[in-house]
Amino acid sequence: MATDIKDTVHAVEAATVMALLPNRPRVLALGEPTHGEDTLLDVRNALFRQLVEEEGYRTITIESGCLAGLIVDDHITSGTGTLDEVMERGFTHGFGASAANRELVRWMRAYNDGRPASEQLRFAGFDGPLEISGAESPRQALTALHDYLAAGVDADLLPCTAERLDRLLGADGRWTDPAAMMDPAQSFGQSAEATELRLLADDLVALLDEQTPGLITLTSREEWDRARLYGRTATGLLRYHFWMADTSPSRMTRLVGLRGRMMADNLLALAERGPVLAFAHNGHLQRNKSTMRLGDLRLEWWSAGALVSAHLGEAYAFLAMALGTIRHQGVDTPPPDTVEGLLYALPEDRHLADAPRLATALGATRPAPCVSPWFGYSPLDPAHLVDSDGIVFVKDVPQS
């Protein structure tokens, strides 16, 4: 069996990744099993650089806020802002503190220097403007969408004035109160103002769609595409805030599902303009239903990867990342009867496993699930082995 398993692994390189796939996917997604370990992001950076240089990918998107990501994109395409400013303001979830993310931005900016716009790399965050503690106000997205439309269509076509939007939005604090995540009664999402804003946001997005030819001619496809992002984000945030105010047992399931939907919509929009390299937690990119436990509550929802895969078919590919040890987090050598343990026994420090061939090599010998002592690390589910195109395995993750 060991020989068969060894035959399924290769070096972690662009050429070996592409050899696993029937064709170059429109969205090539690489997952990680935990956040906050720059060693895993270094592997990502090296692989994505090869895929850019050898396979022609031109967009890199990660699990970070879609609106904040515009700051990074402006920097790498035009040099707007300093690197320090971009790392502070252009990432959410604390990811701007990562040295590996900093190196990714620095390299993308250097790659673009002197190249025409048609050959430049683009950066995007594909997560909603959300955090574990809650969601942002829809103000930025709604007002930006309204401003774009107000500059390009007759005023009498607009469903409201900017002043009315501002009055309905009110203070941002009533949208961002962290108490609302745990107590629906503290949420503003089902107020009369929020209900009216949902209708207005829907009308603004509809108007954007109706006026597409004229708006693209008047502005540019780039500006129109950004307005679409504002529209998706505004409607997504208002829907998310609505369910934050819900008191039914399905409240948390709807919230995680809505986040997955927002992620998927952003990935699909990015894929419309060209091939995309995506990076996030495995749970956001896998083809199967994702699960999470909050105390006694078990949540289950279709992740962004599952949704995008349903739309794109073979044009979506997913490489799960797995690891052996994170000793500084109490994750020790994996048991030998787990997928992680079988891969850990191989001599290479890093390798790419052909997941379907590995499943075939294991045959009826079904690996046991690996159990992590650390909440922040999610081992592979062996039942999902055949649903990924490959496994990028990192043997040991040292403390950064």
Image: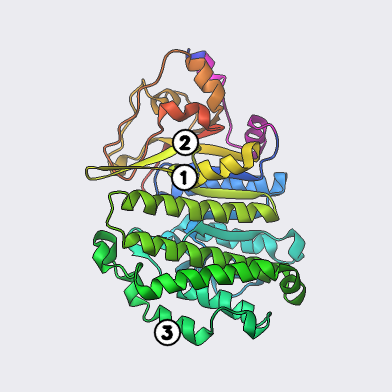
Name the residue tied to disc 3: 167
Q: Nearer the viewer, mark 2 or mark 3?
A: 3
Name the residue tied to disc 1: 303
Of 88 and 126, which appears nearest the observer?
A: 126
Q: Is 287 drawn above or below residue 272 in the view shown?
A: above
Name the residue tied to disc 2: 288
Q: Nearer the viewer, mark 1 or mark 3?
A: 3
Instruction: Report if residue 111 is visible in the image.
Output: yes
Q: CA distance from mark 2 to mark 3?
A: 42 Å
- Magenta range is 4-22
Quadrant of the image occupied by residue 220: bottom right
Of 325 and 77, which appears nearest the observer?
A: 77
Q: CA distance from mark 2 to mark 1?
A: 7 Å
Mark 1 Cα-neighbour bin, 10 Å: few <14, some 14–19, many ≥20: many
Q: Do labels 2 and 1 touch, CB within 8 Å?
A: yes
Which residue, as the protein is rendered here, is positioned at the far bottom?
Answer: 163
Q: Give the mark nearest the N terminus, 2 or 3.
A: 3
Q: How far across and down, in percent of the image, does residue 158 sit?
A: 60, 79
Mark 3 Cα-neighbour bin, 10 Å: few <14, some 14–19, many ≥20: few
Q: How far across and down, in percent of the image, does residue 157 sit?
A: 63, 79
The amino acid beneath tag 2 is Asn
- The question of residue 9 being in magenta is answered with yes
Q: Is 355 drawn above or below residue 222 in the view shown?
A: above
The amino acid beneath tag 1 is Ser
Give me the residue at 28% from left, 49% from top: 249
Q: CA distance from mark 1 to mark 3?
A: 35 Å
The amino acid beneath tag 3 is Arg
